[in-house]
Image: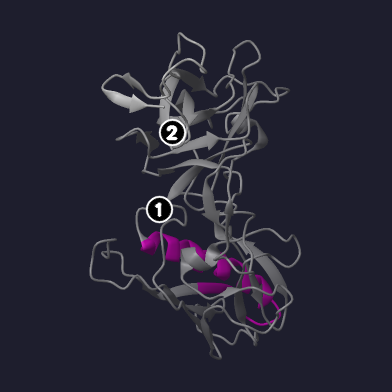
């Protein structure tokens, strides 16, 4: 099928300067096209292409989507959360993980004589960088001590650290298993599975993760739309964490995806056809919703509800809109032969443009 661009124009979008009561937010923008004629005639389609995208990375690598886990032991069951911030090294993440467990386990061991906990044998070592020779597997020992700074019995047993895909009480998603390097747990009623290795001694507890840790769990920001398109995606890119078959492919609302850098998220089209959608069934468009998600289809994590209106979470975008005329292979491209005499008196064989026609 051949196609020809009938008309083309750019739409420049800036999602900043919202208000608390606006329907549009910095990460969920409603583009109103009521005053613009965005129409396609019969045999035409509308094509939207992302020419340029940019935004500041005003969300942290460790955030609400990848920081929560469950600590179980003989004394208590507690939902814990890592601090929401960025890290230069895996060592810094390991330190936060150890500190978070240390704080709660000191509370759980309050029935004994322990008054403090020392963190020992923390790995990776401080000198290990992302490109270094360390496997980046997190491990550490918590040593319980009394008022004399002497190791003492903690009285805690049956310790489990559980990385649920969906937390038992709140049903929140959590990609903490990817961040820290442990096994995910699909069933949030499971109370017996340990996501990492835990060795409980009389005076200490050693925690060892199973896989290399990551400084972040998200590689891309996904731009999505409310328009029905012909683009396809696997079901793993939709609807949060889930344990059903993620190999199914279906139509998607993804318009583009953009690499997350340390400070900005930026994209500029190379060929002009990297990220586009065709709207084969829509002849008129008066509103386009453009919103940002992670790879599970979740809205980006924020520091507060006003960050997307009064705050600094927003994006800039250039959309190219093409009206495309499509023709089928068997459609005629030249007008029919004009006969000047009635068909009953004319020769049924005509010569025109060097061709014999009947």
Judging by the rendered image, the residue that carries numbered circle 2 is 56
Q: At 44% from the left edge and 76% from the top edge, which residue is drawn?
A: 140
> Does 104 appear above or below 31?
below
Majority secondary structure of magenta residues: helix
> Does 71 appear above or below 198?
above
Q: Which residues are magenta?
A: 90-117
Judging by the rendered image, the residue that carries numbered circle 1 is 87
Q: Nearer the viewer, mark 2 or mark 1?
A: 2
Left or right of 24: which side holds 1? left
Q: Quadrant of residue 186?
A: bottom right
Q: Is residue 96 magenta?
A: yes
Given residues 142 and 13, the one toward you in this image is 13
Q: Position of residue 38 (x, y in %)?
A: 58, 18
Numbered disc 2: secondary structure: strand
Residue sitting farthest toward the bottom: 202
Q: Which mark is residue 3?
A: none
Q: Earlier in the sequence, mark 2 or mark 1?
A: 2
Q: At 53% from the left edge and 76% from the top edge, which residue is drawn?
A: 183
Q: Position of residue 119 (x, y in %)?
A: 45, 73
Q: Position of residue 232 (x, y in %)?
A: 53, 50
> Does 256 appear above or below 149?
above
> Does 263 appear above or below 185?
above
Q: Residues within 10 Å of mark 2 (few under 14, many from 20)?
A: some
In space, the residues marked 2 and 1 are separated at their CA atoms by: 17 Å
Q: At 30% from the left edge and 64% from the top edge, which residue is drawn?
A: 126
Q: Is residue 228 magenta?
A: no
Q: At 52% from the left edge and 12% from the top edge, which residue is drawn?
A: 342
């Amino acid at each position: 099928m051949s196609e020809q661009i009938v008309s083309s124009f750019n739409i420049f979008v800036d999602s900043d300067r919202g208000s608390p009561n606006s329907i549009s937010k910095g990460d969920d923008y409603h583009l109103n096209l009521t005053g613009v004629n965005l129409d396609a005639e019969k045999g035409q389609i509308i094509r939207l292409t992302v020419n340029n995208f940019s935004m500041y990375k005003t969300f942290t690598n460790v955030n609400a989507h990848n920081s929560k886990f469950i600590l179980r032991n003989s004394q208590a069951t507690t939902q814990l959360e890592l601090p929401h911030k960025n890290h230069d090294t895996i060592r810094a993440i390991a330190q936060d993980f150890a500190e978070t467990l240390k704080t709660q386990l000191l509370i759980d061991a309050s029935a004994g004589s322990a008054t403090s906990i020392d963190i020992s044998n923390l790995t990776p070592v401080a000198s290990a960088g992302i490109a270094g020779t360390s496997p980046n597997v997190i491990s550490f020992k918590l040593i319980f001590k009394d008022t004399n700074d002497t190791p003492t019995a903690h009285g805690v047993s049956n310790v489990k650290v559980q990385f649920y895909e969906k937390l038992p009480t709140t049903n929140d998603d959590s990609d903490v298993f990817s961040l820290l390097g442990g096994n995910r747990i699909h069933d949030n009623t499971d109370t017996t599975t340990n996501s990492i290795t835990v060795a409980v001694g009389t005076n200490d507890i050693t925690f060892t993760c199973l896989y290399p840790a990551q400084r972040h769990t998200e590689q891309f920001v996904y731009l999505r739309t409310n328009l029905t398109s012909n683009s396809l995606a696997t079901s793993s890119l939709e609807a949060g964490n889930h344990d059903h078959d993620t190999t199914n492919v279906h139509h998607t609302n993804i318009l583009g995806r953009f690499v997350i850098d340390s400070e900005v998220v930026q994209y500029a089209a190379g060929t002009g056809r990297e990220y586009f959608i065709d709207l084969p069934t829509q002849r008129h468009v008066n509103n386009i919703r453009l919103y940002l998600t992670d790879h599970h289809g979740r809205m980006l994590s924020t520091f507060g509800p006003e960050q997307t209106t009064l705050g600094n979470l927003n994006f800039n975008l250039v959309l190219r809109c093409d009206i495309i005329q499509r023709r089928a292979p068997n459609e005629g491209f030249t007008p029919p032969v004009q006969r000047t005499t009635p068909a009953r008196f004319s020769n049924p064989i005509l010569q025109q443009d060097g061709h014999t026609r009947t």
